[in-house]
Image: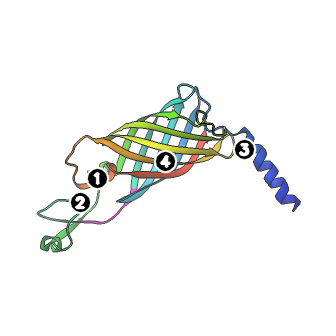
């Protein structure tokens, strides 16, 4: 029983010092799992504090696994109709490296302290400009210690560069969810 009480005390004291967003000069590094309709992957990013509630950063994602796509030879679309006779004469397509990767520059409004959250929590929202689209994201960070925490983030496209997105371009032009670890540097 003593060990449990000591452990809870140590954890609670370490959380008193944790800060999710410090403002100007703050640097965050994040790594996590990326989940979306057609695949899963990894995401790596960093944020740099520019002001009390403003940061900018960069994020890159790479899809490790993509659901198998059977594409008819004469109708090159990502979502074929399995009842279509042309589907029987189909081939499996694999996305290339450029289809799997996305890189974005981003701008965040860190509003955890504005809405009165404890200093070890932060809610942020922002805009991103990437290789495939202009989009937005909303996220949450929770820090256990001054250097380590977890995050969850949802991303969504606002405007696609090409309105007729076909083939594997759909991979990086959809709703995404990332969850992982966040580090103060």
- Distance from Cα at disc 4 to Cα at disc 2: 26 Å
Residue hosting label 2: 78
- Judge the density around disc 4: few (<14), some (14-19), many (≥20) Cα neighbours within 10 Å: some
Q: Earlier in the sequence, mark 2 or mark 1?
A: 2
Q: Is residue 52 left or right of residue 5?
A: left
Return the residue found at the far right: 2
Secondary structure at numbered mark 4: strand
Residue hosting label 4: 153
- Distance from Cα at disc 1 to Cα at disc 3: 41 Å
Secondary structure at numbered mark 1: helix
Residue 175, x across and y down, in percent: 38, 51
- Judge the density around disc 3: few (<14), some (14-19), many (≥20) Cα neighbours within 10 Å: some
Q: Are marks 3 and 2 in contact (CB under 8 Å)?
A: no
- Distance from Cα at disc 4 to Cα at disc 1: 20 Å
Residue 145, x across and y down, in percent: 69, 44
Q: Are marks 2 and 1 in contact (CB under 8 Å)?
A: yes
Q: Residue at x 62, y 39 (%)?
A: 20
Name the disc covering residue 159, or none: none
Name the disc covering residue 15, or none: 3
Any magenta on residue 103?
A: no
Q: Earlier in the sequence, mark 4 or mark 1?
A: 4
Q: Earlier in the sequence, mark 3 or mark 2?
A: 3
Whether residue 4 is situated above or below residue 141 in the rendered picture: below
Name the disc covering residue 170, or none: 1
Q: Which mark's residue is nearer the viewer, 3 or 2?
A: 3
- Distance from Cα at disc 3 to Cα at disc 2: 47 Å
Q: Residue at x 31, y 66 (%)?
A: 68
Q: Quadrant of the N terminus?
A: bottom right
Q: Which residues are magenta?
A: 64-70
């Amino acid at each position: 029983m003593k060990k449990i009480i000591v452990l809870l005390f140590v954890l609670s004291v370490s959380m008193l010092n944790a800060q999710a967003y410090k403002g100007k000069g703050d640097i965050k590094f994040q790594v996590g799992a990326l989940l979306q309709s057609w695949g899963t992957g990894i995401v790596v990013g960093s944020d740099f504090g520019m002001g009390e509630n403003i940061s900018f950063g960069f994020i890159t994602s790479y899809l490790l696994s993509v659901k198998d796509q059977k594409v008819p030879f004469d109708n090159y679309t990502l979502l074929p109709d399995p009842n279509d006779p042309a589907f029987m004469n189909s081939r499996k397509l694999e996305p290339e490296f450029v289809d799997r990767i996305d890189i974005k520059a981003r701008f965040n409004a860190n509003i955890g302290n504005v809405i009165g959250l404890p200093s070890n929590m932060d809610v942020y929202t922002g805009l991103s400009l990437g290789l495939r689209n202009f989009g937005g994201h909303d996220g949450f960070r929770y820090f256990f210690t001054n250097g380590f925490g977890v995050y969850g983030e949802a991303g969504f496209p606002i405007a696609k560069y090409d309105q007729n997105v076909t083939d594997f371009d759909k991979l990086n032009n959809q709703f995404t969810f990332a969850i992982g670890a966040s580090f103060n540097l």
